[in-house]
Amino acid sequence: MSVITVERKILEKNDAIANEIRHSFQEKNIFSINLVSSPGSGKTSLVEQTINLAKDKFNIAVIEGDVQTSLDAERIGVFNIPVVQIITNGSCHLEANLVKDAYKQLEEKEIDLLVIENVGNLVCPAGYDLGEDLKVVIVSTTEGDDKPLKYPAMFRNASALVINKIDLLPYVKCSLETLRKNALSINPNLKIFEISCTKDTGLNEWIEWLQSHLKK
Amino acid sequence: MHELSVAEEIVNISRQYLPKENNVHVKSITIKIGRLSNILPDSLLFCYESLIDNTPLNGSKLIIEEIPIRINCMKCGKNSETDHISFLCPNCNSSEIKIESGTELLISEIELFENNLE
Ligand SMILES: Nc1nc2c(ncn2[C@@H]2O[C@H](COP(=O)(O)OP(=O)(O)OP(=O)(O)O)[C@@H](O)[C@H]2O)c(=O)[nH]1
Ligand SMILES: [Mg+2]
Ligand SMILES: [Zn+2]
């Protein structure tokens, strides 16, 4: 009978690959964000709008994560910017090794901002570092104002919160004030944006924030 | 459902500790999971059991120690422990807190046993 002391992080392999990725991004002066939300909150819509408004200002590339399809990459493809689709085949979150492989296809490109759209899920992606600089979480008004309290880990780890679909506020039971208060009770340092991707509201502030983080 | 990926990593890491002797087996693997790690213990156990069939870890038990959330308040200095997820100091309601524990996700030890009847 013997006991071996291990004391190793279960996700150490993912963390090690994420650090490798972070190092490559740093060398190339790429600012990267990991975009997370529930399914359908507007991740791809925000990426589309960001490209629309900023593609003449700086170079954007996108890595799309999806469980099953390449539909999101097809939406981004029409903008003529570098995009790579990762299909996770059922897995509910992106892992660093998938991002590392996807990035191989982008290595030669000139990139200032790399957006990684995670799989739509507010739980599982929280524990997986992808080597990004910052996590941005999106909540849309149709999801209600209690989401930060229900998925605290995600809000705790994020640097910014995009409240999307504010054009729908008149039709849904969701108070911006409560949503803000709930989010800040989980993470007082969250930078909060109020946006409508379909009505082009609040996007300039978002673009300026991105621009202020660029490394070159 | 990231319990499956977590269970796979537990198996991968634990296999590195398998003894060479044929009569030594893994009795149990003890892991620590913090309340903030978003892992459902029952679901993790289920995934683990289904992965170890036909592997040298077959028959081993996964022991899960759940670690509570401990926060240290930077305003009033009080330490507190909670099982429900909150990032406010229960004493003074301040949000300026440090998380001392609760985010763990690690393998702490592996217990082996010898079967001399084999
Ligand atoms: N009314 C309104 N609808 C929006 C807004 N932003 C996105 N939508 C709609 O919401 C739906 C989902 O948007 P997507 O951008 O595909 O959401 P997503 O988060 O990328 O979805 P998944 O990748 O499937 O998780 C689409 O029908 C969008 O047109 C908005 O600001 N207002
Ligand atoms: Mg999408
Ligand atoms: Zn306090």
Image: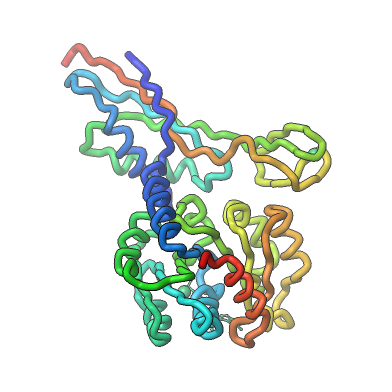
- The front one of A111 and A45 is A111
- Which quarter of the picture shows residue B69? top right
- Residue A145 appears left or right of A114: right
From this view, report whether residue B3 is shown above or below residue A146.
above
In the rendered image, the quadrant that contains the N terminus of chain A is top left
- Residue A80 appears left or right of A172: left
Residue A152, position in %: x, y?
A: 62, 53
Residue found at x 33% / y 65%: A102
- The front one of A149 and A31 is A31
Residue B79, position in %: x, y?
A: 73, 32
From this view, report whether residue A39 is shown above or below residue B44.
below
From this view, report whether residue A20 is shown above or below residue B103.
below
- Which quarter of the picture shows residue A46? bottom right
- The front one of A57 and A5 is A57
Total numbered circles = 0
- Residue A108 appears left or right of A92: left
Residue found at x 63% / y 65%: A161
- Which quarter of the picture shows residue B51? top left
Residue found at x 29% / y 17%: B113
Residue A3, position in %: x, y?
A: 37, 18
Residue found at x 64% / y 40%: B99
Residue A163, position in %: x, y?
A: 65, 71
Q: Describe the colour scheme in one phrase.
A: rainbow
From this view, report whether residue B9 is shown above or below residue A126.
above
